[in-house]
């Protein structure tokens, strides 16, 4: 196996581990936001949840790009 495949697999596995480990924290922050809708703290928690969603989206796009790149290099 080549280096690109190992980088792709590592990136995907590490990303899943990080997402799973952060999921409970994001659920707790969402519960706080639902309970305190007009609080200053809710605004900062909402911002962190939005950044978590954006980073998850970016991780998914990069993962797909790495998989397509590996297929292109090895099968194309």
Image: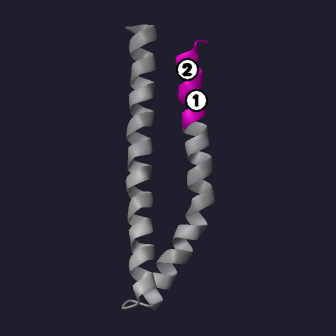
Secondary structure, magenta segment, majority class = helix
**CA gap, disc 2 to disc 1?**
6 Å
Tell me the residue that label 2 is attached to.
5
Which residue sits at x=39%, y=23%?
A: 68
Q: Position of residue 19 (x, y in %)?
A: 55, 53
Question: Residue 7 vs residue 50: left or right?
Answer: right
Q: How is the image coloured?
A: one colour
Q: Is residue 40 above or below residue 44?
A: below
For label 2, count other residues whose C-alpha is less than 10 Å away and answer few (under 14), some (14-19) or many (20+): some
Q: Position of residue 24 (x, y in %)?
A: 60, 67
Question: Residue 15 vs residue 72: left or right?
Answer: right
- How many marks on residues? 2
Which residue sits at x=44%, y=51%?
A: 56
Magenta residue span = 1-11
Which residue sits at x=42%, y=42%?
A: 60
The numbered disc on residue 24 is: none
Question: Residue 22 vs residue 37: left or right?
Answer: right
Tell me the residue that label 1 is attached to.
9
Res 67 → quadrant: top left
Res 28 → quadrant: bottom right
Disc 2, disc 1: CB below 8 Å?
yes
Which residue sits at x=60%, y=32%?
A: 10
Task: State the SS at label 1.
Answer: helix
Q: Is residue 21 above or below residue 40?
A: above
Q: Position of residue 13 (x, y in %)?
A: 60, 39
Task: State the SS at label 2.
Answer: helix
Q: Position of residue 4 (x, y in %)?
A: 52, 19
Q: Is residue 76 above or below residue 17?
A: above
Q: Quadrant of the C terminus?
A: top left
For label 1, count other residues whose C-alpha is less than 10 Å away and answer few (under 14), some (14-19) or many (20+): some
């Amino acid at each position: 196996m080549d280096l690109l495949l190992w980088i792709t697999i590592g990136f995907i596995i590490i990303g899943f581990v990080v997402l799973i480990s952060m999921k409970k924290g994001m659920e707790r922050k969402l519960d706080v936001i639902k309970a305190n809708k007009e609080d200053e703290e809710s605004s900062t928690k909402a911002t962190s949840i939005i950044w978590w969603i954006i980073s998850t989206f970016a991780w998914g796009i990069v993962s797909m790009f790495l998989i397509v790149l590996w297929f292109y290099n090895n099968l194309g």
